[in-house]
Image (cartoon, rainbow, N blue to C red):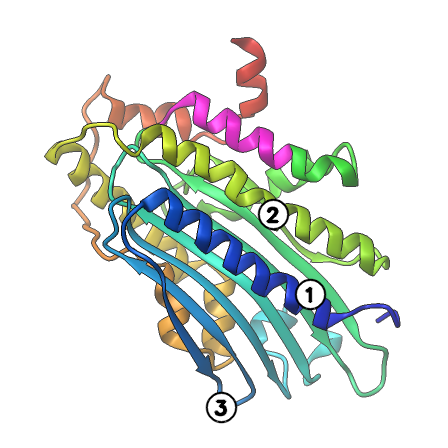
Amino acid sequence: MPQHADSSAVKDYLLGLQDRICARLESVDEGAGFIRDAWDRPEGGGGVSRVLSDGRVFEKAGVNFSHVMGTTMPASATAHRPHLAGAPWEAMGVSLVIHPHNPFVPTSHANVRFFIARPADAEPVYWFGGGYDLTPYYGFEEDCVHWHRVAKGACDPFGDELYRYFKRWCDDYFYLKHRNEPRGVGGLFFDDHNTGDFEQDFALMRSVGDSYIEAYEPIVQRRKTLPYGERERDFQLYRRGRYVEFNLVYDRGTLFGLQSGGRTESILMSLPPLVRWDYARIPEPNTEEAKLTEFFLTGRDWLEVNDDQ
């Protein structure tokens, strides 16, 4: 790891990001505030979980900071780096999931993280990761285009093709193989990011982290007062089941947290408070519920959709 790689600067940024996002979400909700739960991890490190429950807009919002360390790399982190097996490590990040009351407001997820491994017989190795994705229950093209425009703007200073690359990675990652469908309308995803220029890599993580709330807040403001009824709420709870399935079966962060002895309460804060599963449920043809999977959850290029309008 280069001499100028500064994990303390990354930690300061992440704690500030958590504060800024919570403040913005509280302003949007205009009701409940976040509770703050600081915790220690016996194996090393700790974190601060911030949770808003049963607000006016958000049924549950969790924004978690963690800074944990250990003496042996977890299996989920060494699958692609076998040479680091057994190395001491340190990981820090901010991870959040927002579950709104109104079915017309999408669920959103974001994460930015930093990892260092320090093998005994080699130089330390660092990498960054992160991204964000959007999971609507009822789709709006305007929202999808805005979400992806902001995501592209966050990536553009670091390379013309970076957004396309991270967008494809996101589509591939947030895919439920057992359902043969995407979890949502995508966004950004990247991992193992180390160009050898720490300052540039750190700047990319900051750009992604800072852009999340700019992507999400306008969507919430547009949709939070739309009227809805029992039909829409029932469909939202059913589709939340897909979110739970992905997090418990595929999500790397969940697997890493559990394998590394993380705090279960914080790791599973991403799960919605209410959810339902129905056997072999198929939306009625030509309904907004059917349009979700037929039009929105197809991995489409939302910037091209905008160009065609």
Secondary element type, mark 1:
helix
Q: Name the residue at 71% across, 83% down.
A: 87
Residue ID for mark 1: 10
- On screen, residue 2 above or below 245: below
Cα distance in 3D space between marks 1 and 3: 23 Å
Check residue 210 in the rendering and tell me which mark sits there, or answer none.
2
Cα distance in 3D space between marks 2 and 1: 13 Å
Q: Tell me which secondary structure the magenta stretch mostly adopts.
A: helix
Q: Nearer the viewer, residue 107 or 247?
A: 107
Side of 92 relative to 65 (left or right)? right
**Of callouts 2 and 3, which one flags the residue occurring earlier in the amino acid sequence?**
3
Q: Nearer the viewer, residue 213 or 33?
A: 33
Quarter of the image holding residue 86?
bottom right
Residue ID for mark 3: 42
On the question of residue 24 being in view, the answer is yes
**Of callouts 1 and 3, which one flags the residue occurring earlier in the amino acid sequence?**
1
Tag nearer the camera, 2 or 3:
2
Instruction: Find residue 246 and report its horizontal and vertical position in percent.
Output: 39, 54
Span colored in magenta:
139-152
Q: How many marks?
A: 3
Q: Name the residue at 82% across, 60% down.
A: 198
Give the amino acid at mark 2. Asp
Q: 10 Å neighbourhood of mark 3: few (<14), some, or many (≥20)? A: few
Q: Residue furthest top?
A: 309
